[in-house]
Image (cartoon, helix red, strand yellow):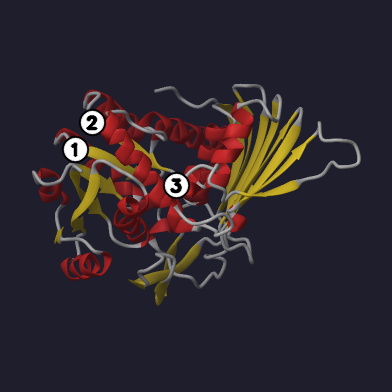
Amino acid sequence: MAEIGVGLVGYKFMGRAHSNAYRQVARFFEVDPAPRMMALCGRDEAGVRAAAQQLGWEGYETDYHRLVARDDIGLVDVATPGNSHKEVVLAALAAGKHVLCEKPLANTLDEAREMLAAARAAGPGVVTMVNFNYRRVPAVQLAQRLIANGTLGEIRHWRAVYLQDWINDPEFPLVWRMKKELAGSGALGDIAAHILDLAHFIVGPVAEVVGTMNTFIKERPLEVASGGGSGLTAEAATEKGPVTVDDATTFLARFASGATGTFEATRLAPGRRNYNSFEVNGSNGSLVFNLERLNELRVFLADDPEGMQGFRTINVTEPAHPYTGAWWPAGHILGYEHTFVHAIKDLLDGIKAGTSPAPTFEDGFRCQAVLDAVERSVDSGSWEKPAEA
């Protein structure tokens, strides 16, 4: 079996999730090439050295330029805050490396356009992918199949929410996700991007949007030190600084297909730890997904016999379901971390085939264009169309 050397830039929340995926993928799936975890990269030498040892990397680098120049690395994985995505991705592509980039693709539409152009210029042999990992939930894959094969009929409505509460406390520190220069946007780019990508995957392209963005907590204590691990904890100082991104966003959408959509994302919803949920209504049925019960898909079919109609709950763990046959017997549920393993599996399959798997950089740009249109609609107060590449 062939191997491909992997270099991962970023070692906190997403870096840990990606590291676990590289460790596990060849243990459960037949992949060729298999990943070899060559180097973890971060600016803090003590921190990245410790993380490399803990997470199973053979070595580390403190400068991504050295990482992408290494002959033993063929795949560069970018799991940093959004402000550095472009520079690392462009350097990796210029060096002829395959690239996996965390979502969203960039902090701005112009950056995303430049990255897409670089991916196209790199040629067909260079594989690129954006890690919208929730596409890899088996129940989401099943939902997409049911819609693609016409089981639900004509799709008319999409409604989705992504609700979290981890910054509801106004004394929670001003971490990088609340700084526009680092994150690009708040709830819009952090979590609304996820449900938007799911909408693109399941329903199709969004044609126009109109929305709102709100910042309810306008200043917070400065951050003394990151809590590491999940990336969602930190130590607060006494001095405060301004929050420069949105806490919440809500927007309406019209899809190219004619379907209508609603989206809501907030990080200020007490009790909602990671509530990523969508419902799709078609002429012949409906389906409902909730990430907090990610092994289940609820399905209603209008052509069920009278008196027997109702939502059924499908436990998406049978060998017939996407990805699940490689794991455990039916009913032995999967979790969040498995979505990253599935993404890496598909990426490696794409590298073998010489084809970029979805979500491609085109998909990443399409998502960024809708986020940009939402921001423009907040300023204009009217419907806005996403830009084209």
- Image coordinates of residue 122 in percent, x first then y, are 21, 27
Specify whether 117 is left or right of 284.
left
Residue 163 vertical position relative to residue 387 in the rendered view, above or below = below
**95 vs 330, nearest the viewer:** 330
Disc 2 or 1, which lies upstream in sequence? 1
Q: How many numbered circles does the render carry?
A: 3
Residue 109 vertical position relative to residue 61 in the rendered view, above or below = above
Local crowd size for mark 3, using a 10 Å CA cut-off: few (<14), some (14–19), many (≥20): many
Which residue corresponds to the image point at 55% horizontal and 70% vertical from the top-left?
A: 169
Quadrant in the picture for the N terminus: top left
**186 vs 329, nearest the viewer:** 329
Q: Circle 1 sits in a helix, a strand or a loop, which is it?
A: loop
* Residue 106 visible in the snapshot: no
From the image, tell me which residue sits under label 2.
126
Q: Are marks 2 and 3 in contact (CB under 8 Å)?
A: no
Quadrant for residue 354, please give it.
top left
The disc labelled 2 sits on which kind of residue? Val
The numbered disc on residue 133 is: 3
Q: Are marks 2 and 1 in contact (CB under 8 Å)?
A: yes
- Distance between the Cα atoms at labels 2 and 3? 21 Å
Quadrant in the picture for the C terminus: top left
Which residue corresponds to the image point at 70% horizontal and 33% vertical from the top-left?
A: 157
Disc 1 or 3, which lies upstream in sequence? 1
**345 vs 84, nearest the viewer:** 345
Quadrant for residue 33, please give it.
top left
The disc labelled 1 sits on which kind of residue? Lys
* Residue 64 visible in the snapshot: yes
The numbered disc on residue 97 is: 1
The disc labelled 3 sits on which kind of residue? Asn
**272 vs 223, nearest the viewer:** 272
Quadrant for residue 125, please give it.
top left
Residue 43 vertical position relative to residue 28 in the rendered view, above or below = below
